[in-house]
Image: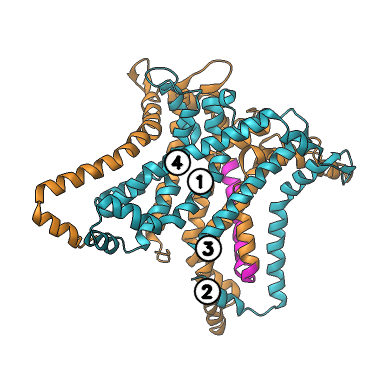
Chain colours: A cyan, B orange
Amino acid sequence: MRQTNQRRHHSHQPSPQHRHYTLIVWALVGLLALPLLATLLYSLASRWGATMLPDGLTLRWYLELWGEPRFLAAFARSLLLCFAALALSLALILPLALVAHTRWPWLDKLMKLLMLLPFAVPPVVGSVGLLQLYAGGPLPLVGTPWILIACFFTLTVPFMYQAMATSLKAIPLRDLLDAAHLLGASTPQAFIQVILPNLRNGVLVALFLSFSFLFGEFVFANLLVGTRYETLQVYLNNMRNHSGHFTSALVISYFFAILLLTWMANRFSRSA
Amino acid sequence: MLSQPIALNTALRRQPRLRLARGSLGALLAVLPFFLMFGLFQLAPLAWVAVNSLLVDGQWSLGHFREALGSPFMRQALGNSLWVSALSSVLGLIIAALSSYALYRSSSRLRELVLAFASMTSNFSGVPLAFAFIILLGFNGSLSLLLRQWGLGDDFNLYSTQGLLLIYTYFQIPLGVLLLYPAFDALRDDWQEAAALLGASPWVFWRDIGLPVLWPAIAGTLLILLANAMGAYATAYALTSGNLNLLTIRIASLVAGDIYLEPQLASALAMLLVGMLVLTAVVNQCLLQRSRYAPD
């Protein structure tokens, strides 16, 4: 697919028209990059008053940020929450996807329907019910990291299930399982040793994408837990009245984390 | 799907009932934890909201909906959410469509680079995005100061629906490009050449061939952008600490505000939002099914 596209597009001769299109593309890149570049420059500026360019450059704000215990703690909490939610998501959705593609095909149809739910029910709506159901009673989870792990899991369902379903449909699942059975493997053994290695890349891409998505989650984190278990996004919001240079350094540090994750996702999707 | 696995068939012949029962039990145990968690944290909250939006003092009633739609303040929130979402989606879609066509006509190296950049910026949303715009265009933003020096942009206020419209349009663009570009890839170069040979002007080509092919993707993208903007909360909240009157801001302030809480009224507003989002999802599904040119 990719190769045929490349061949087709390579046939375009550089023409005046071609240059116009390249110009539009670069205008798009410039437009998308503008807020980021301004933030980057602001985070490196020692002072930026009423001039076009800052007075001087410094790394002071980054040093201040990365020496701030509250920031480091929030960063660590966000990482921990994302890892926990992704581990949970993998542990719950993988068996589901395997059953849906080997034994109960109706489950796959049901999942296609359920996958639409997180889109129709944005976190703000979910929070209304969650705050009433889990503020007290038998499961007093509001204000604890546990409710965030559970909610983050629900957010990953569409990405993770879709990725697994696509990977499972791409391999000769029946033949692989039959061959494993003929060679004396039990069904769980066949899943772990034969099927899982075939899903590795597809699932890794979904994990990276889900991670960068969860890392930026603010609504659940702010409404359900807030400062009781402050995540990076909540911390960023609470720093609103702090120096703009400091918050810029925070935004840029966050963006570099996202950059790294999407770059890794891209690499894995290429080898998938 | 159609043929039973050979191994399972032979096993069934050997120990029919036992093997089947054990397998089904195993499958059930494998999917149960998922449905438990999904039920508790996705279905149950939605069910609570749906039921409580219709309960007034323990009686079934449409009172909360009447109260929500009767209040000018809530109607303003609903109106703001609708027009900011609709306008930002249309603007974002137009820019995304022009960019996607330009990308389709660009060299493959540039295209892959820009698509990777778009997928990165599509993750740049919520609180950090609001902050980046405050730094660029806020009261003392670098671009605001510059524009003011030139005597421009005096009447622009970032901390208003105007500013929100700008930021929403910004986050719709990379998303729109990522959703739309694959559809442009389905256009064949030779169609345009063939149409030109048969005497069609570029305008006629786009009216009779190009747009009909792209139309399901364009409509679907518009609906996804619309739903995305209507459900958004973080950007607007971070921009003004919740002082903008939007539907999502109203819902959140009724359950987690400082003054007094009305979770049932919040539920009614939430159900209005869910209703609109479900409607866009249903229309989108219909479009996908009707599309003769869908990828598969």
Identify the chain of the residue marked 2, using the numbered disc in the image: A
Between marks 3 and 4 in the image, the one whose residue lies nearer the viewer: 4
Q: Are marks 3 and 4 in contact (CB under 8 Å)?
A: no
Between marks 2 and 3 in the image, the one whose residue lies nearer the viewer: 3
Q: Type of residue at label 3?
A: Arg
Q: Type of residue at label 2?
A: Gln
Residue marked by disc 2? A3
Between marks 4 and 1 in the image, the one whose residue lies nearer the viewer: 4
Residue marked by disc 1? A210
Residue marked by disc 4? A87
Where disc 1 sits, the SS reads helix
Find the distance from the CA under tag 3 to the CA under tag 1.
17 Å
Give the image location of residue A117, x and y in percent. Answer: 40, 41
Identify the chain of the residue marked 1, using the numbered disc in the image: A
Q: Which residues are magenta?
A: B84-109
Residue marked by disc 3? A270
Q: Type of residue at label 1?
A: Ser
Find the distance from the CA under tag 3 to the CA under tag 4.
24 Å
Q: Residue at x 25, y 45 (%)?
A: B27
Between marks 2 and 4 in the image, the one whose residue lies nearer the viewer: 4
Q: Residue at x 72, y 47 (%)?
A: A36
Q: Residue at x 34, y 16 (%)?
A: B58
Same chain? Circles 3 and 4? yes
Q: Residues within 10 Å of mark 3 (few under 14, many from 20)?
A: few
Give the image location of residue A99, x and y in percent. Answer: 28, 49
Q: Is residue B269 visible?
A: no
Relative horizontal placement of residue B69, taking residue B148 as reference (left or right):
left
Give the image location of residue A55, x and y in percent. Answer: 90, 42
Q: Nearer the viewer, residue B91 or A253?
A: A253
